[in-house]
Structures are given as C-alpha cells and as structure tokens.
Amino acid sequence: MSTVWGGLALGAIYALVALGYNIVFVSSNVFNFAQAQLLMLGTFIAFWGSVTLKLPTVVVFLLCAVVVGVVAVVEERTAIRLVRGTEGLLVTTVGFATLLDGLTQVIWGGQPLQVPFFGPSKVLDLLSGNVFPVELVLIGVAVVLALGFVAITRGSMLGIALLAVSEDREAALMRGINVRAVAIGAFAAAGVVAGLLGPLIGPKTFAVATLGSSLALKGFVAMAIGGFGSAPGALIGGFAVGLIESESGRYLGESYSTLMIFLALLLVLLLAPNGLFGHARERTV
C-alpha cells in the first residue's frame, strides 16, 4: 500500500498538469507546452518565499499564485496572441517553456532545492501503508479540481462560453463573447492553479530546473490516455501513469518505469485512439 499511495500521489501531480493543459485547450483550442514549467516555477517561488524570505504559509501561497499567474498572462500575450492564426503556436509555447527552464536554472541553480512541508510532515499509517499528509492533500486536490472543471464547463454560462470559443472562435466572437478576455482568463486561471500547487508539489518533487520537462512528458501521456479536453480522463490518466510508474519501478526496476508508461499509452491508443474519455469532433461541411 505504501507503493500504491506513492503512485497515487505521483499520479495526482501528473493529473494536475494534464488538467492545466485541458483548461487552456478547452477554452482556446491551444496546447500549452509550458504548463508544466509554470508548475515548476511555482515550486521555486514556494522555496524562495518560505526558505529565503521566511514568509508565512498563507503569504507564500498567495505569492506563488500571483507570480505564476502573471507569468501565464505574459505567455498568452507574447507566445500565443502574437502568432495566433499561424503554424507557430506549438513552437512558441515550447520556446516559452525552454525560456522558463533556463531562467529558473540561472536564478536558482541546477541543484535540487528542498521545499518545506506546509502542515504536518509526520508519516501516517493508512490502510497498512505509509503516506505523507501532503500526498493525501495532492490526491484530494486533483479530484476536487477535476470535478470543479466538469461542473464549470457543463453547468455554467462561463463554461459554455469557453467551449464555444474552442469550437469556433469567429462564431463565438459574432455572438458577443469577449474572446480575448476568455483566452487571457484561461491562461491566468491555469497559471494561478499551477502557482497554488507549487508549495504542495515541491516537498515531494523538490524544486529543480529539470522538473518541468519531466512533468510535461508524463502529464501529456496522462492527458493522451484520458482523452484531450476531458477532466475525468486527465484524472484517471494521471493516476494510471503514477501507479504504473510506481509499481513497475518497484517490481521491474526504475529503468523500466518509463518504458511501461509508454507501453500502456500505446495499448490505450490502439484500443481507443481518442483516449479513454475522449471523443472525435465531427463537423458538417
């Protein structure tokens, strides 16, 4: 059970990255490759606020949310809006992710930095397995955010507007939807969520400049397994990736964990090309 709890906690992190991808994808039909780097930036801001500045816990969370949210808005204004309508969107988001990787390494160095636990750090014995309280919080946050995403996109006017912009940007504009505000809001929301998660993820992953690349890859796999645009799919896909990584690392060795993750991805895509919860879009021509 200790391995299962560890896998679920890892899976919650991957699911949160996939949810960040989906927030932007559903609202603007853009895949933001820099989402994982925003999460990584949140861990560094958490270290800076808690260790360097020694700020109170609440202030650290607010600082992470504001800084990462602002960086996400800057990304939308520079890497997305200026090249929208061209073939360069994926390239610019990858470039912004690379820029964040380089900046964090220049500012904080390449060595892993220990982010302190927020709250109790005593190991709990739950269902015959050892688990840290922060791991339980991560699992709970992932579930709550996935359910909240579903509730917003399916049961509110804001969610309908987001889906409308993603489906047909020009038609949504003609219906009076402020497309630019929706796009900025989606990026800002994804950034704020990534910032708030930084202090929670940092104690488990450390703050290190290579974190973004690792999370981006496995978060993408989680979203591909679950299905693009599906919050429940991101959650299930993230938990699946985390459990596969944890269990294969234990029984087969760490060198086989990534191999097993991509083997599972290939099997899912062979059986369900759109992911477990995804669906193909059809348009009448």
Image: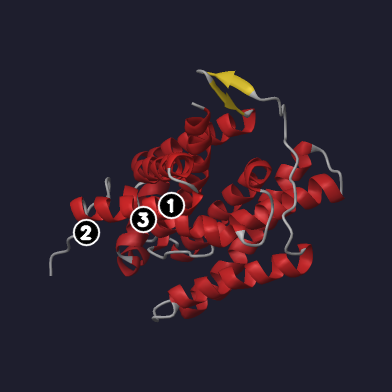
Report whether 165 appears left or right of 280.
Answer: right
Q: Please report the residue visible at 72 percent of the width from the left and 55 percent of the height from the top.
A: 112
Mark 3 surroundings within 10 Å by alpha-carbon count, few (fewer than 14), some (14 through 19), many (20 or more): some
Q: Please report the residue visible at 27 percent of the width from the left and 46 percent of the height from the top.
A: 276
Q: Residue 28 falls in which quadrant of the image?
A: bottom left
Please tell me the numbered disc located at residue 189.
Answer: none
Q: CA distance from mark 2 to mark 3?
A: 25 Å
Q: Nearer the viewer, residue 5 or 282?
A: 5
Percent position (x, y) of residue 275?
27, 51
Mark 1, secondary structure of its residue: helix
- Residue type at the position of mark 3: Phe
Residue receiving disc 3: 262
Please tell me the numbered disc located at residue 281.
Answer: 2
Mark 3, secondary structure of its residue: helix
Mark 2 against mark 3, which lies toward the viewer? 3
Does 135 sit above or below residue 28? above
Q: Residue 86 falls in which quadrant of the image?
A: bottom left
Q: Reading the chain from its start, which is encountered first: label 2 or label 1?
A: 1
Mark 2 surroundings within 10 Å by alpha-carbon count, few (fewer than 14), some (14 through 19), many (20 or more): few
Residue receiving disc 1: 256
